[in-house]
Structure formats: structure tokens, C-alpha cells
Amino acid sequence: MTTGQTVTTGAAATGSGAATWQRDASRDLLNVGGRLALLVRGEGSHVWDADGTRYLDFLGGIAVNCLGHAHPVFVAAVASQAQTLAHVSNYFATPPQLELAARLKRLAGAGDDAHVFFANSGSEANETAIKLARLHANQTGKRMILSLEHAFHGRTLGSLSLTPKPLYQDAFRPLLPDVGYIEPTISALEADVDDTVAALFVEPIQGEAGVVPLPDGFLRRARELTAAHGALLIVDEVQTGVGRTGSWFAFQREGIVPDAMTLAKGIAAGFPLGAMITFGDHDLFYPGTHNSTFGGNPLATAVGNAVLAEIEDADLLANVTARGAQLRAAVEGLPLVAGTRGEGLLIGIMLTASVAGAVRAAAQERGLIINAPTDDVIRIAPAYTIGDAEIDEFTTLFAAALSAVAASDPKEAA
């Protein structure tokens, strides 16, 4: 903490300072995102705004900051690589890039015939996978690409085409042709995956839908059906990957191997990095079909190596599993809580009323950052490094927020 800095807990920035940054943001930034506070510093599981207000961050940059804020491993990796070699373009390979590709293949259980493409975000990773699906479609004559209802694969035009939410899609039609959406049920799989399908995209847990896991056996049946019909199974692990659920990748819990996987978010703990991995003989790209100037540059991949090494060396996957169970138990019985779902430290807290937005706001007023992906679900995705102190603080602040919302309307407390 800076000497002389006044720190308070809760209460979003107010006064002339808040008015100034909000005015500047409205004037200078594209009007596409929220501006809940002006954050200036982070350490561990806490962040501070421009007025010195401290918040417990249990959203983790939307499942990105897996090591928390300003972790020494992250800081050292950025500093070391930045003074060595930061960027060289995609005409060259670098040691950090090659090391990270090999590391990801090992962690994913992929063989020597697997290949990795590095991008800068989850949407870009999914764009790469969509192009893989199109290459497969052109090779086989199969045209349809399927995704699931309530899916979220990104906001670029291709990934948006696989994200069936009218609020996101309608302003940008027409979208990609030959894309369809099916219910996330085994019966829908069996009805709709046929010889016309080139690829099926799935998220093991639909985070933006309210942290909704796929039904038991869904991924295994999807693997069987896509293999039988010559379609690619592409697993979007942008939110669930690199340990978020307690396994390196959520598909591994089902004992399957996809044809391709996309990932991003926690892979570099806050540094922009995404990737697509192809398994088996499904690398259909050749020079000229795809690339990225920044993708896989030495700075990003050096950070990715350091982050994944720390998760392994510190046995953080075990902590993810243990702390996830501890958090789910801690919120049971709190006002307005109907139950929980999810895996590891990707948790959806289901509410008894459609007041998630009010709960999120009340939590921020008390110094807690959480998220409301739907009207009746709160999503939390804290750092893998949390312990008893952070869980106790979260429980206290979250209970206070729930109680405040319930007290504002007696019907909500019922």
C-alpha cells in the first residue's frame, strides 16, 4: 500500500474524481462495456480504485486472473522477457513459443501429431477453430457447423455466429451461413448430428448462460456421434481451461479426446493470449490460410509458460478443487441462495428470485466484485490461490449483500 493512502472498503468512487473519469470514459471510449469503477492497483485477491477503496475480487477478470493480481511469478516473467525479446512477428519462432506449445500438448494429453496455434484472445482462438471447421467442410462436402443453445463463443463475426443470443447477434446480421443451434441435451445430439455436420462446438460448462454444466454423458456421446458421422468435435475451454474446474481441461474429466480445443483467459493470468490445439491428423491449415502478427509472441508465451509452471509447481489444481467445495458449502443457507452449480472455482450461485443484478450492485457497494451473467445467477471465478481468509471475507460480504437485497423487498426473502 502506498504510504499515506487512505483505504476504505466498499462504496464505489464518488465525488469530483468519479465524475472526471466517467466523463473522460464517455468521451473517449467506445460505448460497449461497463464502467463500474476506476481501478488502479491490484495485489493478490484485492484491487483498489482511484479513491483508495479496496475490493475483494471474486470475478478474477472473468476467470482470467488465475494467480490473482501482481503475482511475483507473473511480474518476473513480464520483466525478464520484456528486457530480452518482446516481439518479432510471425515470420520467426522463439524459444518461449516452442516451450509453451509443447507444454500445452503435454497438459492436454495430446500426442506428437497435435499442433498449436497461438492467438490473442478466446474469440480469436474460436475464429481459428471455425476456419478449421470450414476447411474440414470443404474437404468433406459436409456444410453444417453446430453449436449449442445458450452458448457463448465470442463477439467477432464468426464466433458471434455460434453464439445464439439475439441481443448480441441481431445488429450484425447476416452472420455466417450453414450454422445451426441445438439444445444441450443428449437427445438433441442424437437427432441433429448426422452426415451433413462438419463440426460441433461445445463448452463443457456454459459460463455466460449462468455456469450451466453439460448433462452427464453429453461429451462422451458427442464424441461418439461426431466420430461416427465424420464431424469434428471442437471443445471451447476458453473459460473452463487451464485448471479452472480442478482439471487442466474440463474435457479430460469425461475421458474423451476432441479434434480441437480452444483456450484463453487463465492461460497467461492476465496477459492477452489464446490458443487452439488440434488433436490427431486434424491440422488442415497450410501457409496463407491463417496467421496472426501478435499471436504467440515471445512476451505473451513466456508469461504463459511461467503461469502454467506455477500452477503445476504449487499444486494449485488441488487448491481449486478444495476451495471450490469450501465456497459452495459456505453459501448454502444464505438468504436468497437456492443452490450452486459448476466445478472447481467456476461457480454459479443460483438465487430464489431474479435479483442477481441487485445483488451484484449491493456486493460492490460493500467491497466485493462478482458477476451476474443471468437474472437469477451470480458467477464467481476467483484466483486459484485463495485460502481461508479470502473465503471468510467473501462469505461475510456476500451474505451482507444478499441480506440487503432481501430486506429491500420482503417477497424476495421468502
Image (spheres, rainbow, N blue to C red):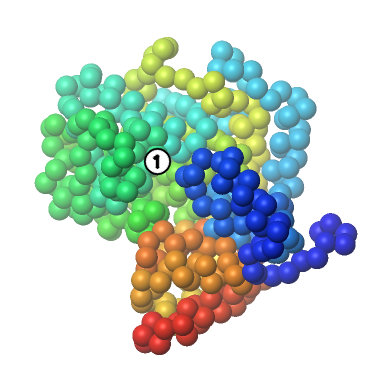
Q: Which residue is mark 1?
A: 154
Q: Position of residue 391 (x, y in %)?
A: 60, 70
Q: Is residue 202 visible?
A: no
Q: Is residue 286 visible?
A: yes
Residue type of the residue flagged with mark 1: Gly
Is 331 drawn above or below residue 291 in the view shown?
A: below
At horizontal 47% and vertical 78% (from top left) the residue drawn is 405
Q: Position of residue 130 (x, y in %)?
A: 33, 30
Q: Is residue 231 left or right of residue 341?
A: left
**Considering depth in this image, is 202 or 401 the residue closer to the camera?**
401
Q: Position of residue 297 (x, y in %)?
A: 60, 25
Looking at the rendered image, the quarter that the N terminus falls into is: bottom right
Looking at the rendered image, the quarter that the C terminus falls into is: bottom left
**Considering depth in this image, is 363 or 380 the residue closer to the camera?**
363
* Quadrant in the picture for residue 272: top right
At horizontal 24% and vertical 52% (from top left) the residue drawn is 184
Q: Position of residue 344 (x, y in %)?
A: 48, 60
